[in-house]
Image: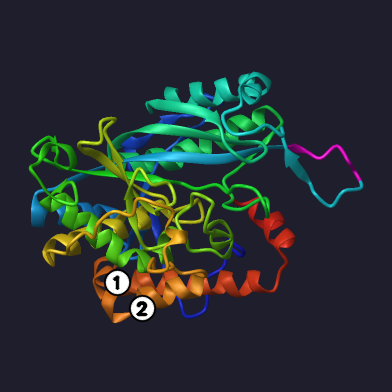
Amino acid sequence: LHADVCALASGLGPVGEVRLVPDTPTLKRCPWYPKHAMVHTHLYSGGVRWKIGPRGALIEALAQAERRHGLTLRLGFEHEFLLLRPNPNPSSDDKWVPIDQTSYCASQAWHQQVGVLDAIVNAVEALGQEVEQCHAEAAPGQFEIVTHHMPAMEAVDALVMCRETICAVAATHGLKATFIPKFFANEAGNGSHMHFSLWANGCNIFSEGVVESAGLPRTAAQFVAGVLHHLPALMAVTTPSTNSYRRLQPGTWSGAFQVWGMDNREAPLRGAFSPDGSTATNFELKAMDATANPYLAAAALIYAGLDGIDMARVLPEPVEMDPHLLESAPRLPTSPEEAYRCLQHSDHAIIRQGLGEGLVRAVLATGRSAASFFSERTFAEEVKILVERL
C-alpha cells in the first residue's frame, strides 16, 4: 500500500522472474473504453504455478474443498465506496471532497448522482455481472453496489473487475471513486462484505439440509464454526492494514467482536436468513475491506471452514443483541500486528499450512512494513496516500 518494493524478510527479492500468463476466458472488453480490455492472469515461475500467487492459492483452496468434502462455494460481494470531487478551495490541503452530504439511502443522493451511478451500473452489467442493488450509504458521498453470488473464483475475479469499473467510470465523469476503509474519522467506513454459501450436488446446504445445530445443517454449522474460531487469524488477510482497524470499531456495523448472529449487523459473521427466519441462505463476513487481497481472503476463509468440518467444531449460540453490551464477547484484534500474531499462533497453524508458509511469510512481512510506515504518519497523511491507491 505504501511502496512498490519487496518488503524485507518477505522472501522476495530482485533475482528471478515471475510471468503473467493470461487466463483468456476472463478477457473482458472495457465498456467505458471499448478499445481496451481487462484479463486476469496466472502467475508462473520456472514453468510452474508460482507458490506465492494469491489467485493460485484460491484455486488450490477450492480444489481441496471439492476433493475433501465434495463442496463448492459461491460468493457475493457488497462494494462500498466513496465518490469524491476535486476540492474547489485551492487553499485547502484536501485534494478531494465528498460529492454530497446526504444520508443513508437518501433519494436526493440518487437524484444528484444518477448520471454517474447509472453509467457505473450499466458498465458492471456489461461485464456480465448481475447488480442486485445500488444505493446511497451512510457517509457523505458513500454508495454501495451489491453483486449477485457466483462460483467463488468467478466471483473474486468479478470483484476485481467491478472495482476497476467503478473507478474508471467515475474518472470519466471527473470524479474519484475510492474504496479506502476509513476516509472520515467520524463517519462510516467502506467494507467489502463477502457473502458465502456452501454447495453440494447443486444444492445450497445452508438452506436445503436437515437443520441440526444453531439453526443450520451440521456441515454448514461446522464450516461457520471454523470461520468463527479462526476469525482473529483471518483478519491478517481480510483486514490487513492500519486503516482497516480505524473502521473496525464497536457501534459501526463493521464487526468488532468474535461472535456470530442471525441478521445481527454488529456481528462480523452474520447469518442472512430467509424472511421468515426459518433457514439461512448465506453468511456474511463483514470484517473485510479493500486493503485485503480478495483471493487470499477467500482462500483463508475456505481453510478455516474446512478445519471446522474436519474438527467437528461446534457453533455457539447466536448473539441476538449488540455484542458491545456483553461483557463476555471477546474483542477481535484492534491492530494489524494483533492479527498477524494470531495468524502466527499455533492454534491457527491450519491456515498457514493451507496458504503455504512462503505466501504467509510474504503477507506478514509486507503487512508489517506497511504498518510501520503508517505508524509514523497522521491519519490525514494516511488518507492522502491511500485514497490514491484504493
Q: Position of residue 351 (x, y in %)?
A: 28, 68
Q: 286 above or below 89?
A: below
Q: Are marks 1 and 2 in contact (CB under 8 Å)?
A: yes
Residue at image location 65% in from the left, 73% down from the top? 375
Q: Amino acid at mark 1?
A: Arg
Tell me if residue 49 can be seen: no
Q: Is residue 10 visible?
A: yes
User: What residue did someone put label 2 on?
Assistant: 344
Position of residue 182 measured from the top left corner of the image (x, y, whole percent): 61, 53
x and y percentages locating residue 81 in the rendered image: 57, 40
**Which residue is found at the position 65% from the left and 28% from the top?**
172
Q: Which residues are magenta?
A: 85-90
The residue most toward the right is: 91
Relative side of 367 to 313, left or right: right
**Helix, strand or loop for the magenta stretch, by majority:** loop
Instruction: Reply yes or no: does residue 315 show up in magenta.
Output: no
- The relative height of residue 108 versus residue 360 in the rendered view (above or below) is above
Within 10 Å of the Cα at label 1, are there few (<14), some (14-19), or many (20+) other Cα atoms? many
The first of marks 1 and 2 along the sequence is 2
Identify the mark at residue 352; answer none if there is no mark: 1
Q: Which quarter of the figure is the N terminus placed in? A: bottom right
Viewer-nearest residue: 168 or 66: 66
Element on which disc 1 rests? helix
